[in-house]
Amino acid sequence: MSRHPLIKWAQRSDKLFITVELPDAKNVKLNLEPEGKFFFSATSGADSIPYEIDIDLYDKVDVNESKASFTSRNICYLVKKAESKWWSRLLKQEGKPPVFVKVDWDKWVDEDEQGEKSGTDMDFGDFDFSKLNMGGAGDFDGDGADIDEDDESDTDEESEKIANGQPGAEPASAEPESKA
């Protein structure tokens, strides 16, 4: 009896991403039919354990425009949909999907976000974030050159009094002085 490798999937309106997680796959066979029949088989491991997937995709696909890519860790399929529309699920079968079928959240894009750029390419134009006054360390160089010399705990006058030993000027200290 064959085992089922993990399948991760994601979609766009016009294509599917199907990744079969099977390290060191050998004797890989793939059959994709226009009506959505997806068959995969391979062996893996030192004992050449057989793995197999035979599923019916939700809708029809364009076999001629679909592609496969093989790496040492997985097999990635880019499956072109016959019609450019969002599928409500990967499989034609209704109900809970098999345990070996998972969503590929790294590639997933929601239907309403498809035309948008990814978060790393956000364009904020000439927006100046420094005017938001959200706190933080400010312009940190790590060299200490930006340290504010004005400490509110003692003013310049208090510092002079302390240095000259004038009465009424006590140094700021965390430890109480002992009077003996």
Image (cartoon, rainbow, N blue to C red):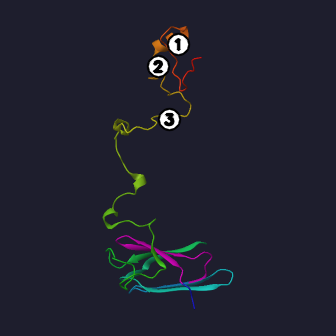
Query: Regarding mark 1 in the picture, which secondary structure is present there?
Result: helix
> Mark 1 to mark 2: distance in Å?
10 Å
> Mark 1 to mark 3: distance in Å?
32 Å
- The location of residue 57, given as percent across then percent down, is 40, 83
Query: Regarding mark 2 in the picture, which secondary structure is present there?
Result: loop
Q: For the residue carrying disc 2, how many other residues have a C-alpha within 10 Å: few (<14), some (14-19), or many (20+)?
A: few
- The location of residue 121, given as percent across then percent down, is 41, 52
Query: Regarding mark 3 in the picture, which secondary structure is present there?
Result: loop
Main secondary structure of the magenta stretch: strand
Which residue, given by chain and number where applicable, does mark 2 sit on?
Answer: 154
Q: For the residue carrying disc 3, how many other residues have a C-alpha within 10 Å: few (<14), some (14-19), or many (20+)?
A: few
Which residue, given by chain and number where applicable, does mark 1 sit on?
Answer: 162
Please state which of residues 92 and 26 is positioned toward the viewer in this rendering: 92
Q: Closer to the observer: label 1 or label 3? A: 1
Q: Amino acid at mark 1?
A: Ile
What numbered label is drawn on residue 140? Answer: 3
- Which residue is drawn at the image coordinates 52% and 18% (left, top)? 171
- Which residue is drawn at the image coordinates 33% and 61% (left, top)? 115
Residue interval drawn in magenta: 4-28
Q: Is residue 69 visible?
A: no
> Mark 2 to mark 3: distance in Å?
25 Å
Which mark is first along the chain, 2 or 1? 2
Check the picture and name the quadrant holding the N terminus. Answer: bottom right
